[in-house]
Structure formats: structure tokens, C-alpha cells
Image: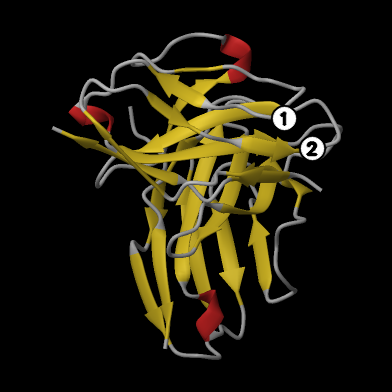
Amino acid sequence: AQRVTQPEKLLSVFKGAPVELKCNYSYSGSPELFWYVQYSRQRLQLLLRHISRESIKGFTADLNKGETSFHLKKPFAQEEDSAMYYCALYGSGGYQKVTFGTGTKLQVIP
Amino acid sequence: GAGVSQTPSNKVTEKGKYVELRCDPISGHTALYWYRQSLGQGPEFLIYFQGTGAADDSGLPNDRFFAVRPEGSVSTLKIQRTERGDSAVYLCASSNRPYNEQFFGPGTRLTVL
């Protein structure tokens, strides 16, 4: 079974402070992991995926297979980063099930 | 270009009724996903289509739920004998191939009274 855990429902940080949104996963195969974001009154949209290894809007995420984690990080939070963030795991091996975490609401305080 | 669209945006029905929710994916996207999102939860996978066929329907909660995509584009999620517990936002997403970025629709908010 595949499982994604986001332990924090709400994370409040001050503008300019570092941000780390936690994501842990459980999966027996080789995981494909993504971060999706939903800004207020907007649709869910992709933020980044682990295989691209790129920085989007200053966010990065590293897949740590040893710790089965895919934490999202940003060195300096901006007010426009306030949103819901979801970690997602795509299944493989012939099954395409996608499992989302419960989400973390990031609130950046001015 | 046009994104994923879903109709209706809101649907209120009575317990025991039948409902159909429609998804229009981005043109040319072969992969289509349905999710259900309850308050305070992340999207819960229901079914994945690759073309016309359901490649993975392991997320459908029971046999009251059924989805089709007869021509490989528009998809319809069908719920029979609705129950109050079916109340949620139903999301559709499409992708140009598996493991790629999913583009989400605005969702259909279903309320079963």
C-alpha cells in the first residue's frame, strides 16, 4: 500500500523566515513524488517534482529514500507563498494510483 | 488555451438519487484522473483512465460509483443511490502522459441531502 503523511495541518512563519513543509511516504516500489499547491480561490497546480530537481518560486525538495521523505523547503518565505501544499506519490509497476497527503496550510505572517 | 473544465460546478441532490459529473480534459491529454476531496483532506484517488480504458479503478469506494470515457476525451463519473457520505468536491485532472504534471479542473461540489 502507498501512503503519504504530512504531519502538520498548519504552519505559520514570519515573512523572511525559512520554511520546511514535511512529507513522508510509504511505498514498496520506486516512488515518483510531487508537490502540488493550491492558492486561495485557485485550482490545484503542480509546484515541483522530484525528478526535475529544479527550484520553483524558490522552493526545492529532495527525495531522501533512506528516510522516505520529500520535504519542501524555501530559505525565505514570502507572503505570496501562503497556500495549501499537498505532497503526492504516483504509483508505478502497472498501477497508476496517485496518493495525496492531507495537506499543510502555509501561512506567512507579514 | 482552455484548461480542464467540470460541470456542474455545484450539484445538490437527495439521498438515493443518481448523479452524473462531467469532466472535459485538455485537448490531447490521454491520461485522466478522478479524485474526491472531503473537507480538511487531500484529494482521494478514485480512478485513472489512459485513453478510453480505466487503467486503475482501485480507488472507487464501491459499486455505486462508475466512470466512463468512451471516446478518450470527455469523462463522466456516475454515482448511483447517492448517500450523505458521498458529499464532497469531485476533482478531475488530465495529463499528457502518466507521471507527468496533472492539470486540475475547478471541481464539482456535490451535496447529498
The one of B78 and A23 positioned closer to us in this rendering: A23
Looking at the rendering, which quadrant does residue A84 occupy?
top left
Q: Secondary structure at mark 2?
A: loop
Q: Position of residue A32 (x, y in %)?
A: 69, 26
- In primary-sequence order, the first of circles 2 and 1 is 2
Regarding residue B98, the answer to whether it shows in the image is: no
Q: Which residue is mark 2?
A: A27
Which quadrant: the N terminus of chain B? top left
Instruction: Report whether mark 2 lies on the same chain as mark 1.
Output: yes
Look at label 1 and name its amino acid: Thr
Quadrant hosting residue A58: top left
Mark 1: give few (<14), some (14-19) or many (20+) Cα within 10 Å. some
Q: Is residue A62 above or below residue A9?
A: above
Which subunit holds the residue at mark 2?
Answer: A
Is A14 drawn above or below residue A44 in the view shown? above
Q: Residue at x 67, y 66 (%)?
A: B66
Which of the chains bears the disc numbered 1?
Answer: A
* Residue plotted at (22% across, 24% down): A78
Position of residue A83 measured from the top left corner of the image (x, y, whole percent): 31, 39
Is label 2 in contact with label 1 (beta carbons under 8 Å)?
A: yes
Q: Residue at x 57, y 46 (%)?
A: A101
Q: Which residue is mark 1?
A: A68
